[in-house]
Image (cartoon, rainbow, N blue to C red):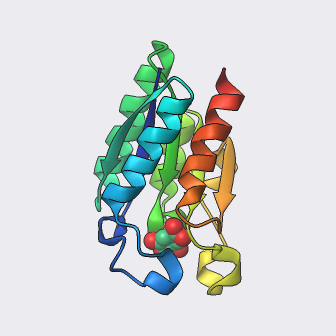
Amino acid sequence: ASIMVLNGPNLNLLGTREPAQYGHETLADVEKLCADAAAALGHQVVCHQSNHEGVLIDLIHEAGQKVKSGDMLGVVFNPGAYTHTSVALHDAIKGADVPVIEVHISNVHARESFRHHSYISPVAAGMVVGMGVQGYVLGIQGLVSKRT
Ligand code: DQA
């Protein structure tokens, strides 16, 4: 089956954006890591990135349809700063009934207090925080072990 790897705002800047926080790998490097990790488990990834909340919501709805039809296992999702602001993404995940593994490259709990609250965690199937870009791989492995 497929796995959606979904990245939210500013994650297109990976590699150059705050490397002390997010490392030197680019989004393309991360997507390649994910493709290899999924392939090793007999699955494929579909990768998307958007800076727009509504586009992310549409993609979650799309994933929900694919999960229902059995074509998709779920979504490995780094919502970026929308993690801390978006009731709409919370509602989308709940409404689409889609298994989501929430990923944060950095340890958000060791950072500013405005990063400590997540609207996504209460509707996530699991979370990977502070493991660097390897967190996406761990998220894929976790989703596969939960869903197969
Ligand atoms: C992030 C953490 C968020 O607080 C931040 O806004 C991001 C990236 C992470 O991967 O560590 O954009 O989700």
Please, is residue 28 above or below residue 130 in the view? above
Picture coordinates of residue 59, whole percent (x, y): 35, 39
Residue 5 versus residue 82: which sits nearer the camera? 5
Residue 33 versus residue 49: which sits nearer the camera? 33
Picture coordinates of residue 45, whole percent (x, y): 41, 35
Q: Quadrant of the C terminus?
A: top right
Measuring 52% from the left and 40% from the top, which residue is drawn there? 37
Picture coordinates of residue 52, whole percent (x, y): 28, 59
Measuring 57% from the left and 67% from the top, which residue is drawn there? 132
Please, is residue 148 above or below residue 89 in the view? above
Picture coordinates of residue 18, whole percent (x, y): 42, 84
Q: Is residue 111 left or right of residue 55?
A: right
Please, is residue 135 above or below residue 111 in the view? above
Q: Is residue 2 left or right of residue 112?
A: left
Q: Is residue 1 left or right of residue 32?
A: right
Measuring 51% from the left and 57% from the top, which residue is drawn there? 87
